[in-house]
Amino acid sequence: MKITLLAIGKTDNRNLQNLIDDYSKRVSHYVNFNFEIIPDIKNIKSLSEVQQKQVEGEEIIKKLQPTDQLILLDENGKSYDSIAFSKYLQKKMNSGIKNLVFVIGGPYGFSEEVYQKATGKISLSAMTFNHQMVRLFFVEQLYRGLSILKNEPYHHR
């Protein structure tokens, strides 16, 4: 199984990007992992929130293949602790999915079309985080979940 993380816009903070790169490399030891950035939308200040979500949604959908399973990182999604998330990953790996795609949307969330294509939603926290930090939190939890499945000592029980 391949895991893809899609995110809107580049990470501005070099230190944060270094940590994201480190955990992405760690994840790649377990699965075929791809972190793909969808470029920032041009002339975004001239768009309403709805228009911005629509344009971002079109870009997200362009990246998907018909067999991809789309999971949104969304504040209204299901919450997992690290052990439960590792079990979630194992279930997805066992199901024969070719590409599990997680998406971090823009500041206003996702368009209706993206919600309709999604097969699930996961919330990382009830708190609101900077979209750039969510990338780090997610790849770290992905690494943690995969290391749990391998019974490695990264996660202390």
Image (cartoon, helix red, strand yellow):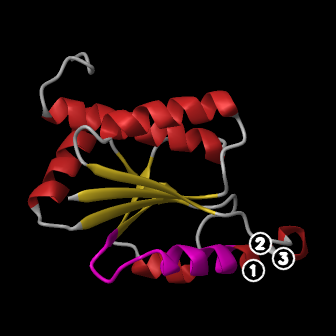
Instruction: Evaluate if marks 1 and 2 touch, with contact meaning CB atoms under 8 Å apart.
Output: yes
Residue at mark 1 to residue at mark 3: CA–CA distance: 6 Å
The magenta region covers 53-69
Q: Nearer the viewer, residue 42 or 111?
A: 42
Mark 3 lies on residue: 47
Indicate which label's residue lies in the foreground, 3 or 2.
Answer: 3
Please count the marks in the image: 3
What amino acid is found at the position of numbered circle 1 in the picture?
Gln
What amino acid is found at the position of numbered circle 3 in the picture?
Leu
Quadrant the C terminus occupies:
top left
Instruction: Evaluate if marks 3 and 2 touch, with contact meaning CB atoms under 8 Å apart.
Output: yes
Mark 2 lies on residue: 49
Question: Image point 62% across, 64% down: which residue?
Answer: 109
Mark 1 lies on residue: 51
Residue at mark 1 to residue at mark 2: CA–CA distance: 5 Å
Question: Image point 31% across, 56% down: which residue?
Answer: 3
- Secondary element at image label 1: helix
* The quarter of the displayed image where residue 106 is located: bottom right
